[in-house]
Image (tube, helix red, strand yellow):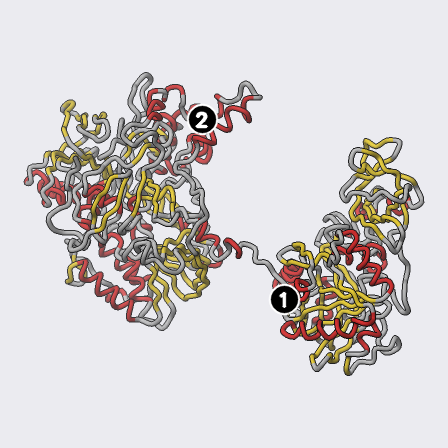
């Protein structure tokens, strides 16, 4: 039977309304404003889950993101399930279905608890030692079972039904944390006319003030001042306030990633639009007001349900109007524990004793406690606790002897650890503060300021003052608190390591079941680096990230080595600060938008013509056009024949197109490509290659000079984005002095290619303003004109052995020009052809396909294109690498043609080229292989060691499971065809 632990008054919940939810199949009631944790505690539930390794009963420890134990599976209905959600961070809404994790068959009776009995056999690092023999068992036996047991929750097995969003924002000041320091900073910064973004991970702003209603600020009760501050910020047009928003990653140049929960606080029936949004905020300055986290204490059996942080009990009491139990013992080594004890006693909780580990108690606080009937013990410490699914008592050791107290909850006040996670991510340096007994920000490397508790400042008035000054306010006008909560230093004292043979466990990391003995064992076995200790024991890993365990573990490891904590060092804080859903990270990039399918402006015509499409990167291009039940080989043969004998038309809109503009455009391209563009005449085109810095081919394309300061550059379909990235990188970093601008025009222009002996005839019937004759429109030139009143750019280039033209037309009018060309070519044998025929046609001529006939290790000289490389130029991308001796040494693989001696076998692409007499050594591989009706036999291109020197030789290809004899030939099967062609 559950107890009602809700107090008769107090808290910020809406007691006038109730909401229902279930936990492990049992129905409960709570109020709007509750978290799942506060609602369950209010209903007398203290057992939340089982620990990861030993399956020990676990209850609530903290009240916020630091919570390591109360991880639940949340079902919001309609297939919306999510594991490993902190009960302390789940706002209570009507209809939630919650389940505990890591237990079977039930939370109360878990067969995995046998691990607790077997703990002597599974110490830290046992899996590194246990599963080494027999070696053959690892993949068959050990790994499947370990994978089945790994993890805390059950991953959803249905697609995520929610939507997520991304947003970019810029501001002068980004303030992270809306406690007293953050609010003061926002109030001061927003008085100036600059953009301010204030974010806080909580359901509402206020931070520590939400648990401190008895304080006053500027003469107003803390909660009243808080409401006034929120109203002021809401009224200021230059302020964006983001509650329920966690800053989880801090990058360079003050780029901070935020995860905003948009609808998690709403019932599923009311939730509309994106569930979460990821913000990318670029800030002029960042003010960190991320607060601090109370440290637990390490003593035997310190993990029973009902043992929790004192600050968590205070939050439950003051913010949610919930008592954690009837009888409390408070164990402290920091003055803040006395404050909590006094508040609990004032609310009617029977606080039996305050157990102070220090030699002397704060006199005034101790007197106040004794006046309320609370026994105060100094130089005392817990020896162990009792209870099965909830604490029932604690044994205390002190100079006067051993005592035992009965209690139903025990509170730990071990001091405060500043939250320096984001500061550390920003590459700031931290330093040990002896007074704080923790690491604090020491040196920032970005435009950033830390204020309040994350800096080691705990007095409320000082937090308000620091935030106000950081926001640019006048020191004399800073808000002042009526009560500055005690910031007396605590004692970070490492607990004694577990004595041999003892059956008690003193837990350091509650989530991963890491004990003090585990830390000592890691040091004993030679893991002296804190990073090694972390990985050997798993301390501070998973969702906890060391918030409650890190400093205690460091203290134990340092003591085991007779070192100080600063000497032992600090582990690295990596993003994300708290777990972020994959949905928020992906944003719109999910489902059909994970990799959006791109279709050209005339793809509709290919669909109407019955084309079979294939993926080319994100693009879908027509591969071939079967008619009358043709196979692909039959359709491709027919399409190639039409191009060779009459005319063919294909859609090449997907090729990348970049306009390079500016007074230095020609010189800029000279530095990026192997050929010279600055000397290219207006109206002329030139085929060129872009290399990587290591001298290998990155991409190819045609460069056309449109005007004196304007060039049109084409790229491969898949290389468009990468080439633009390389250009932009050089423009900004290597050649910033050049006056040049880059614009991607890939979507602006559709490209219709017309090839074949009758291509000029077809275009001549339609083109206006261009003389299509050979003399006025020679190869590798371009002209501008019109087709049916549509402005076009026509490039006289060909990717085949036939006469060819590339018609560039504004994308929005592409279908008009396509239809006009189709009509004009109807009686002239014009045939549609796809990418497969295009590949055959280019291979017949020996043209390379970057990414297929190159593999990242091919230079222009290897590809037979060395004559176009301007080695006489002062410099270009990759030139220095091309000059290395190895780039021209014997034994390099070179592009050659390959013909089978039986004239019928089609080689498989990727097959290895070998010596027929010794097939064990690879000489290269087949890069392209097709059937060529025009050549009368299969053809292939390949990269072969010293290939050009082997022309005329006989080799073999390991074609499937047999050797096929081949002859090495020039990589050009069809010579120039048609008047004026290349």
* Residue 239, horizontal then vertical, whole percent: 34, 67
Residue at 74 percent of width and 62 percent of height: 701
Q: Which mark is residue 623?
A: none
Quarter of the C terminus within the rendering: bottom right
Q: Which mark is residue 125?
A: 2
* Residue 291, horizontal then vertical, whole percent: 31, 50
> Above or below — where is 492 with respect to 582?
above
Q: Is residue 371 shown to the viewer in this render?
A: yes
Q: CA distance from mark 1 to mark 2?
A: 53 Å
Q: Quadrant of residue 654?
A: bottom right
Residue at 14 percent of width and 53 percent of height: 214
Quarter of the N terminus within the rendering: top left
Q: Residues within 10 Å of mark 2 (few under 14, many from 20)?
A: some
Disc nearer the start of the sequence (1/2): 2
Q: Residues within 10 Å of mark 1 (few under 14, many from 20)?
A: few
Secondary-structure class at tag 1: loop
Indicate left or right for 892 with 744 as reference.
Answer: right
Indicate left or right for 512 with 611 as reference.
Answer: left
Residue at 12 percent of width and 43 percent of height: 342
Query: Which of the two residues, 401 or 594, is positioned nearer the viewer here?
Result: 594
> Above or below — where is 787 with respect to 485?
below
- Answer yes or no: do the residues labelled 1 and 2 have beta carbons within 8 Å? no
Query: Which of the two residues, 722 or 520, is positioned nearer the viewer here?
Result: 722
Instruction: Name the residue carrying label 1.
Output: 736
> Above or below — where is 107 with respect to 282?
above
> Above or below — where is 771 with respect to 452?
below
Query: Which of the two residues, 246 or 377, is positioned nearer the viewer here?
Result: 246
Secondary-structure class at tag 2: loop
- Disc 1 vs disc 2: which is toward the camera? 2
Q: Quadrant of residue 819?
A: bottom right
């Amino acid at each position: 039977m559950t107890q009602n632990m809700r107090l008769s008054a107090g808290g910020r919940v809406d007691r006038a309304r109730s909401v229902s939810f279930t936990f492990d199949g049992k129905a409960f009631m709570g109020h709007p404003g509750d978290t799942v944790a506060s609602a369950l505690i209010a209903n007398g539930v203290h057992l939340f889950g089982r620990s990861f390794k030993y399956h020990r009963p676990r209850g609530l420890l903290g009240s916020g993101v630091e919570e390591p134990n109360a991880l639940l599976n949340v079902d919001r209905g309609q297939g919306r399930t999510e594991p490993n959600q902190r009960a302390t961070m789940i706002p209570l809404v009507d209809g939630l279905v919650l389940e505990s994790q890591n237990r079977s068959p039930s939370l109360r009776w878990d067969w995995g608890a046998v691990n607790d009995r077997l703990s002597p056999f599974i110490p830290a690092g046992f899996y590194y030692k246990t599963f080494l023999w027999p070696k053959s068992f690892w993949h068959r036996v050990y790994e499947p079972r370990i994978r089945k047991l790994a993890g805390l929750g059950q991953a959803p097995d249905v697609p995520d039904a929610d939507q997520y969003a991304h947003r970019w924002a810029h501001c002068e000041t980004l303030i992270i944390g809306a406690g007293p320091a953050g609010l003061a900073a926002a109030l001061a910064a927003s008085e100036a006319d600059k953009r301010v973004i204030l974010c806080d991970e909580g359901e509402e702003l206020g931070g520590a003030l939400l648990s401190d209603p008895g304080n006053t600020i500027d003469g107003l009760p803390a909660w009243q001042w808080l409401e006034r501050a929120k109203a002021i910020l809401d009224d200021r047009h230059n302020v964006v306030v983001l509650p329920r928003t966690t800053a989880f990653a801090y990058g360079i140049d003050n780029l901070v990633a935020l995860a905003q929960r948009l609808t998690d606080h709403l019932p599923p029936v009311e939730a509309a639009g994106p569930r979460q949004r990821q913000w990318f905020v670029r800030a002029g300055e960042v003010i960190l007001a991320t607060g601090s986290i109370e440290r637990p204490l390490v003593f035997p059996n310190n993990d029973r349900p009902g043992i929790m942080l004192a600050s968590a009990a205070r939050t439950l009491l003051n913010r949610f109007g919930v008592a954690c139990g009837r009888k409390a013992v408070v164990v402290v080594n920091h003055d803040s524990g006395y404050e909590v004890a006094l508040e609990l006693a004032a609310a009617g909780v029977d606080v039996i004793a305050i157990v102070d580990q220090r030699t002397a108690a704060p006199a005034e606080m101790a007197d106040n406690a004794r006046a309320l009937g609370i026994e105060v013990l100094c130089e005392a410490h817990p020896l162990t606790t009792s209870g099965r699914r909830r604490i029932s008592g604690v044994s205390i050791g002190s100079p006067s002897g051993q005592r035992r107290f009965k209690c139903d909850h025990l509170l730990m006040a071990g001091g405060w650890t500043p939250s320096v996670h984001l500061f550390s991510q920003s590459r700031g340096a931290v330093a040990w503060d002896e007074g704080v007994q923790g690491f604090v920000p020491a040196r920032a490397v970005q435009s950033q300021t830390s204020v309040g508790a994350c800096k080691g400042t705990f007095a409320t008035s000082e937090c308000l003052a620091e935030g106000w000054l950081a926001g640019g306010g006048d020191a004399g006008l800073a808000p002042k608190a009526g009560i500055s909560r005690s910031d007396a230093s605590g004692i970070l004292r490492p607990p004694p390591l577990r004595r041999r043979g003892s059956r008690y466990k003193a837990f350091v990391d509650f989530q991963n079941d890491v004990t003090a003995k585990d830390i000592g064992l890691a040091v004993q076995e030679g893991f002296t680096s804190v990073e090694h200790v972390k990985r050997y024991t798993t301390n501070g890993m998973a969702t906890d990230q060391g918030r409650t365990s890190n400093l205690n573990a460091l203290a134990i490891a340092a003591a085991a080595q007779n070192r100080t904590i600063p000497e032992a060092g600090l582990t690295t804080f990596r993003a994300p600060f708290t777990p972020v859903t994959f949905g928020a990270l992906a944003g719109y990039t999910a489902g059909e938008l994970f990799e959006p399918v791109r279709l050209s402006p005339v793809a509709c015509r290919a669909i109407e013509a019955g084309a079979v499409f294939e993926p080319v990167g994100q693009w879908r291009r027509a591969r071939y056009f079967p008619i009358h039940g043709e196979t692909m080989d039959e359709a491709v043969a027919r399409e190639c024949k039409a191009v060779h004998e009459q005319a063919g038309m294909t859609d090449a809109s997907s090729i990348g197109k970049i306009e390079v503009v500016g007074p230095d455009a020609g010189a800029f391209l000279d530095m990026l490509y192997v050929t010279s563009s600055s000397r290219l005449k207006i109206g002329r085109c030139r085929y060129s290659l872009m290399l990587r810095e290591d001298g290998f081919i990155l991409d190819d394309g045609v460069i056309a000079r449109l005007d004196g300061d304007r060039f049109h550059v084409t790229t491969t379909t898949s290389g468009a984005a990468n080439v633009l990235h390389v250009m932009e990188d050089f423009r900004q970093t290597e050649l910033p002095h050049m006056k040049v601008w880059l614009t991607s025009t890939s979507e602006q222009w559709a490209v219709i290619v017309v090839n074949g002996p009758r291509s000029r005839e077809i275009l001549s019937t339609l083109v206006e303003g261009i003389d299509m004759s050979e003399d006025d429109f020679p190869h590798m030139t371009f002209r501008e004109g019109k087709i049916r009143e549509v402005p076009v750019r026509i490039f006289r280039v060909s990717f085949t052995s036939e006469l060819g033209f590339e018609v560039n037309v504004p994308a929005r009018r592409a279908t008009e020009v396509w239809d006009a060309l189709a009509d004009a070519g109807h009686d002239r044998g014009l045939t549609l052809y796809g990418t497969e025929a295009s590949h055959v046609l280019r291979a017949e001529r020996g043209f390379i396909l970057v990414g297929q006939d190159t593999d990242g290790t091919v230079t222009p000289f290897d590809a037979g294109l060395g004559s176009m490389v301007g080695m006489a130029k002062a410099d270009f991308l990759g030139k220095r690498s091309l000059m290395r001796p190895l780039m021209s040494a014997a034994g390099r693989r070179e592009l050659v043609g390959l013909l089978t001696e039986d004239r019928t076998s089609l080689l498989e692409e990727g097959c290895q080229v070998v010596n027929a007499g010794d097939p064990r050594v690879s000489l290269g591989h087949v890069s392209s292989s097709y059937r060529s009706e025009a050549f009368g036999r299969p053809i292939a291109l390949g990269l072969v060691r010293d290939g050009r020197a082997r022309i005329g030789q006989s080799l073999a290809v390991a074609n499937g499971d047999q050797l096929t004899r081949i002859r090495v030939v020039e990589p050009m099967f069809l010579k120039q065809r048609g008047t004026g062609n290349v």
